[in-house]
Image (cartoon, grey):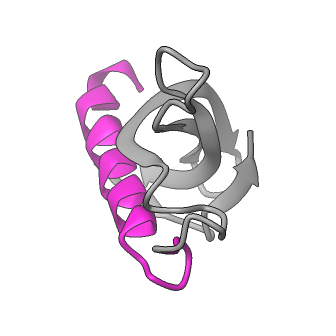
């Protein structure tokens, strides 16, 4: 898995970008959640969970991403706003990550 870290980060970035640019999942209005007016476009990885499927020998990874929001008037820095759980998998003989289920979102 360590050798595939760069590919993992690239796959995560692709999925975050796809989610945040989907008009059915994010909204232009500041009244709706999640709002593109609040999102900064920055995120960080909060947690990773790895699992090996013994039947297929595929590695599965759950990546918990924390998207940041523009600071509110009483804040001095961006804060966590939107959580995304991205589900990826790869086979050791082909270390290319693919999505194996839909991205889950949450308010944080």
**Quadrant where the C terminus is found in the figure:** top right
Q: Which residue is nearer to you in this view: 36 or 55?
A: 36
* Above or below, comparing residue 1 to residue 32 in the picture: above
Overall secondary structure of the magenta stretch? helix
**Residue 98 position within the rendered picture, expressed as x and y whole percent measured from the top left:** 41, 62
Residue at the outermost bottom position: 24
* Above or below, comparing residue 78 to residue 106 in the picture: above
Residue at the (68%, 57%) spot, across then down: 105
- Residue 55 placement, left or right of 18: right
Q: Is residue 93 visible?
A: no
Which region is colored magenta? 1-27
Q: Is residue 67 visible?
A: yes
Give the quarter of the image for residue 23: bottom left
**Residue 82 position within the rendered picture, expressed as x and y whole percent measured from the top left:** 62, 46
Q: Is residue 6 magenta?
A: yes
Residue at the (56%, 52%) spot, across then down: 86
Q: Which residue is nearer to you in this view: 71 or 54?
A: 71
Residue at the (40%, 59%) spot, across then down: 15
Q: Which residue is nearer to you in this view: 90 or 55?
A: 90
- Residue 52 placement, left or right of 26: right
Q: Which residue is nearer to you in this view: 33 or 55?
A: 33
Residue at the outermost top position: 76
**Residue 65 position within the rendered picture, expressed as x and y whole percent measured from the top left:** 55, 38
Residue at the outermost front position: 73
Q: Is residue 69 magenta?
A: no
**Quadrant where the N terminus is found in the figure:** top left
Give the quarter of the image for residue 46: top right
The mark tally for this picture is 0
Residue at the (61%, 49%) spot, across then down: 84
**Residue 75 position within the rendered picture, expressed as x and y whole percent measured from the top left:** 57, 19
């Amino acid at each position: 898995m360590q050798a595939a870290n760069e590919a993992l980060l690239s796959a995560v970035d692709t999925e975050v970008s796809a989610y945040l640019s989907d008009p059915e999942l994010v909204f232009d209005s500041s009244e709706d959640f999640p709002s593109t007016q609040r999102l900064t476009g920055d995120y960080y990885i909060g947690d990773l969970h790895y699992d090996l499927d013994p039947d297929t020998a595929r590695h599965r990874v759950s990546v918990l991403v924390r998207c940041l929001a523009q600071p509110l008037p009483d804040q001095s820095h961006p804060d966590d706003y939107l959580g995304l759980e991205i589900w990826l998998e790869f086979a050791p003989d082909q270390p290319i990550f693919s999505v194996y289920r839909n991205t889950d979102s949450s308010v944080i």
